[in-house]
Image: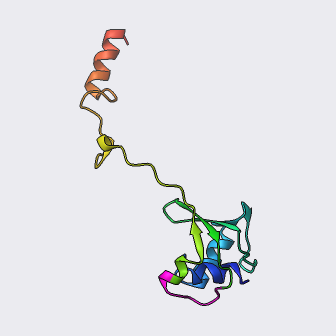
């Protein structure tokens, strides 16, 4: 068993241990749906939820809690089971588009507002 921050660093979720500690203190890491502390011990079978910078959440089940040193990627991937739900596929019709309004369908122009005011008798 090892510390949560050291385990997250050793399985390559965070680049440095201090980044892992800061993320845990910032509330971005939860263990079994409870707030975590950096020195919390990691036990096999626990579920660790890690929220990333882009608001995506990774769900990891701990398989090997004994890692305390940073290891290679193949060894790190064997230390946890990734249970992150798949992201929904992007909508094909919206790919590469920005919200664009057709000309004339938005707010009235100043000229149109004046015409509306004169029509209403203001």
Q: Residue furthest bottom?
A: 69
Q: Nearer the viewer, residue 17 or 43?
A: 43
Residue 31: give x, y in percent of width and height: 71, 66
Identify whether 68 is placed above or below 105.
Answer: below
Residue 16: give x, y in percent of width and height: 55, 84
- At 28% from the left and 49% from the top, the residue drawn is 96
- At 49% from the left and 86% from the top, the residue drawn is 72
Residues shaded magenta: 67-74
How many discs mark residues in the rendered view? 0
Taking the image as drawn, is residue 12 in sight? no
Identify whether 31 is placed above or below 40.
Answer: above
Taking the image as drawn, is residue 64 in sight? yes
Residue 83: give x, y in percent of width and height: 57, 61
- Quadrant of the rendering where the N terminus is positioned: bottom right
- Quadrant of the rendering where the C terminus is positioned: top left
- At 34% from the left and 29% from the top, the residue drawn is 107
Q: Tell me the quarter of the picture where residue 110 sits.
A: top left
Residue 10: give x, y in percent of width and height: 58, 84
């Amino acid at each position: 068993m090892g510390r949560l921050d050291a385990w997250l660093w050793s399985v390559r979720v965070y680049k440095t241990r201090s980044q892992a500690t800061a993320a845990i203190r910032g509330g971005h890491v939860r263990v079994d749906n409870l707030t975590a502390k950096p020195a919390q011990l990691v036990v096999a079978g626990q579920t660790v939820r890690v929220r990333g910078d882009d608001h995506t959440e990774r769900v990891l089940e701990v398989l090997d809690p004994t890692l305390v040193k940073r290891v290679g990627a193949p060894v790190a991937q064997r230390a946890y089971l990734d249970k992150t739900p798949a992201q929904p596929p992007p909508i094909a019709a919206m790919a590469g588009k920005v919200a664009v309004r057709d000309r004339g369908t938005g707010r009235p122009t100043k000229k149109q507002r004046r015409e509306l005011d004169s029509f209403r008798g203001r």
